[in-house]
Image (cartoon, helix red, strand yellow):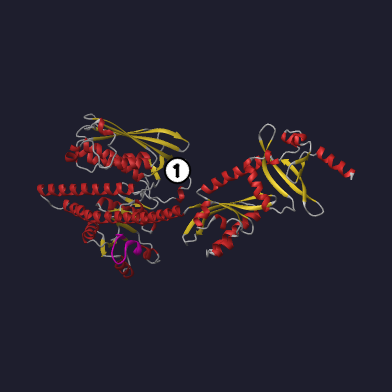
């Protein structure tokens, strides 16, 4: 017994916890010396005192309640605040065990008390962190959840709970399949979710699901963007999910997709409208101009000739306006493309100036070309667009200059490897432009002065079209003008220089698509300097004219008869095929494109697929002036394309090229 007592006293001396004995009235009867380290009291200071006098008042009531509900025969554990000698309260944990006599009556109690202040502090900090984290995830606009391999939710945030329409406590610690079954949700969705969770857990690889369906308890279908991330705790892997509701975005994307489709349809309709407008306006204009040209070469008196020329001039002005409006519409619709071809640059400028000099000479003006000798012989560029720009700019100078000279200067701006910058200036001594108007001069339908409209006519589109074309080719355009002293317009274009073999990479694969200065486009088009042996017409040629417009058909018949060609006319492609099958010889086909029953494309396809007919050359005669239409014509198998209105010079030159004869 003495040994046991000594052992107890030894334990009480070395323990860091407070070991205390109490009588049946709770008063201290014996206290270990460790009380000094924990509370600052000496053991003898506590003997005979009630522990309740040291306990925080708020905790006494809790302890009393617990005491009444606890089995007094077993160990009782309490956590409470106890006042130390400094008057400060610290958290302690007491384990109290009753000591019984032989009648099982409590005669005393032994208590082991330890300081848990730091533990409580850590617990509070952890609790606060948990509350903070919980508030963050609950207030996050995304679904946040974590699941194990069995699909049990370890955590789920309020956003997820609200969307489901299920309380959080009915989600956390429940398996997803059980939840879906209980609330009659889509079990297939649950299976897909679990499948992706298992994949993430087993592979330990993050998974991104751009679009995943999600059905609420109200059967409201939503769409989620989901990211699932694996994480590990104590060697066990879980899946952390973050999902964003993208239903509205998806709906907007669908609306946008629908709008894009509608825009494409509208764009297609606009393209078709432009094509039809081109055809419907240019076809009758072609007839008018053609008939006036025929009338012009008949026997007329001076007054009649004046009227014919006035009518022809008006028709040509109207055609120019139609072309400008169609051009600006195509540009705004983004339907203009760059088609590069091989150009002998000096020849190109000389021929163009010679052609434009006809109108200049009528006003007593002179066009002077200053050509830089340092420029290379040949370049790759869009000849048709450069011609259109220069025709617009020089045409403006001719229109607004009453006397004097118009200077066209072409010089090298820079050369880097096979790239060259070419600077082109057009300078006149015309009426000029007010400085306040210069900034707006390149805007559509703008002229330097409102009075110009009455005096000089025109749409005010030429400069706007020129600027758009220059920029489309990667260039820049500038204007310098002073009212009463003339205008100078400069534009710089980046071009490609041909190598010694007059080729650039992949040029052999490119289709030559440009419209030459006579409105003609040929496959593998040759420049004017190409030498072609033209033979005199040795035998009568037979031409099949396929044209549904009576006036245009008559015009073509007349122009063919003027060069002693025989003609056969068909009003559509179907009739043309029937004629070709019956005729032994046809030397040339002049093919309209838009016709009833069978159009020019359909007829050409049949002809080119027939071994007996495919050698007959076809010249398309079309009111479709758009580059993409001309490209389509050439790809269909027609060798050459001329646009309406058909001028006799243009037509004859095209026939010379296609048949290799001299007219």
Q: Position of residue 5 (x, y in %)?
A: 86, 43
In this rendered view, identify the residue nearer to me: 39 or 567: 39
Residue 41, can we see it? Answer: yes
Q: Secondary structure at mark 1?
A: loop
User: Relative to 397, is 570 above or below?
Assistant: below
The residue at which mark 1 appears reads as 502
In this rendered view, identify the residue nearer to me: 582 or 593: 593
Could you tell whether 154 is left or right of 585 in the image? right
Could you tell whether 204 is left or right of 14 in the image? left
In this rendered view, identify the residue nearer to me: 419 or 654: 419
Q: Position of residue 567 (x, y in %)?
A: 26, 62
In magenta segment, residue 590: yes
* Quarter occupied by residue 614: bottom left
In magenta segment, residue 277: no
User: What is the tally of numbered marks visible in this picture?
Assistant: 1
Task: Identify the image quadrant of the N terminus.
Answer: top right
Residue 18, can we see it? Answer: no
Q: Which residue is rendered at x = 75% and y = 38% of the image?
A: 48
User: Relative to 650, is 544 above or below?
Assistant: below
User: Relative to 514, is 429 above or below?
Assistant: above
User: Relative to 550, is 350 above or below?
Assistant: above
Q: Position of residue 172 (x, y in %)?
A: 59, 55
The range drawn in magenta is: 589-603
Q: Which residue is rendered at x = 16% and y = 40% of the image?
A: 454
In this rendered view, identify the residue nearer to me: 451 or 538: 451
Q: Position of residue 336 (x, y in %)?
A: 36, 48
């Amino acid at each position: 017994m003495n040994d046991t007592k000594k052992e107890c006293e030894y334990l009480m001396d070395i323990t860091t916890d407070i070991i205390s004995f109490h009588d049946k009235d709770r008063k201290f009867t014996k206290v270990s010396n460790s009380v000094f380290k924990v509370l600052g009291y000496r053991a003898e200071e506590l003997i005979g005192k009630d522990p309740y006098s040291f306990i925080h008042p708020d905790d006494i009531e809790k302890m009393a309640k617990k005491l009444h509900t606890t089995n007094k025969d077993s160990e009782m554990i309490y956590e409470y605040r106890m006042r130390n000698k400094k008057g400060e309260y610290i958290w302690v944990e007491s384990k109290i065990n009753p000591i019984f006599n032989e009648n099982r009556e409590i005669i005393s109690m032994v208590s082991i008390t330890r300081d848990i202040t730091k533990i409580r502090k850590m617990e509070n900090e952890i609790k606060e962190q948990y509350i903070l984290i919980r508030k963050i995830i609950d207030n996050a606009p995304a679904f946040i959840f974590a699941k194990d391999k069995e699909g049990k939710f370890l955590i789920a945030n309020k956003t997820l709970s609200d969307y489901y329409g299920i309380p959080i406590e009915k989600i956390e610690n429940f398996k997803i399949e059980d939840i879906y079954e209980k609330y009659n949700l889509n079990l297939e969705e649950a299976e897909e979710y679990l499948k992706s969770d298992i994949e993430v857990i087993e592979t330990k690889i993050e998974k991104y699901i751009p679009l995943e369906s999600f059905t609420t308890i109200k059967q409201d279908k939503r769409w989620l963007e989901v990211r699932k991330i694996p994480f590990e705790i104590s060697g066990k892997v879980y899946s952390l999910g973050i999902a964003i509701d993208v239903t509205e975005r998806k709906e907007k994307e669908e609306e946008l997709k629908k709008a894009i489709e509608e825009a494409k349809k509208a764009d297609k309709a606009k393209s078709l409208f432009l094509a039809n407008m081109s055809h419907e306006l240019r076809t009758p204009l072609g007839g008018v101009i053609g008939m006036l040209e025929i009338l012009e070469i008949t026997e007329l008196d001076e007054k009649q000739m004046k009227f014919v020329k006035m009518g022809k001039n008006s028709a040509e002005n109207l055609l120019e306006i139609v072309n400008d409006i169609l051009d600006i519409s195509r540009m705004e619709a983004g339907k203009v493309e760059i088609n590069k071809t091989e150009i002998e640059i000096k020849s190109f400028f000389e021929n163009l100036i010679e052609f434009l000099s006809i109108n200049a000479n009528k006003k007593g003006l002179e066009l002077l070309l200053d050509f830089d000798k340092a420029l290379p012989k040949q370049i790759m560029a869009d000849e048709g667009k450069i011609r259109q720009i220069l025709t617009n700019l020089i045409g403006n100078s001719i229109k607004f200059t009453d006397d004097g000279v118009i200077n066209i200067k072409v010089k090298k701006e820079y050369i880097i490897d096979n790239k060259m910058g070419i600077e082109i200036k057009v300078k006149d001594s015309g009426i000029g432009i007010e400085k306040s108007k210069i900034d707006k001069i390149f805007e559509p339908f703008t002229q330097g002065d409102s009075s110009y409209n009455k005096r000089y006519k025109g749409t005010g589109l030429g400069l706007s079209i020129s600027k758009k074309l220059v920029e489309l080719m990667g260039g820049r355009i500038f204007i310098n003008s002073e009212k009463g002293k003339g205008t100078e317009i400069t534009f710089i274009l980046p071009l490609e220089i041909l190598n010694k073999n007059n080729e650039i990479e992949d040029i052999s694969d490119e289709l030559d698509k440009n419209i030459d200065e006579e409105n003609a486009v040929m496959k593998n088009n040759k420049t004017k300097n190409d030498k072609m042996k033209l033979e005199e017409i040795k035998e009568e040629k037979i031409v099949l004219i396929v044209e549904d417009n009576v006036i245009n058909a008559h015009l073509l018949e007349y122009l063919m008869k003027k060069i002693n060609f025989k003609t056969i006319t068909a009003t559509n492609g179907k009739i043309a095929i029937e004629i070709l099958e019956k005729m032994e010889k046809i030397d040339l086909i002049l093919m309209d494109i838009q016709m009833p029953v069978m159009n020019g494309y359909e007829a050409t396809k049949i002809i080119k697929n027939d071994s007996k007919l495919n050698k007959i050359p076809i010249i398309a005669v079309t009111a479709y002036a758009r580059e993409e239409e001309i490209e389509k014509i050439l790809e269909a198998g027609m060798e050459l394309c001329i646009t309406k209105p058909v001028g006799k010079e243009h037509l004859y030159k095209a026939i010379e090229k296609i048949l290799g004869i001299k007219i």
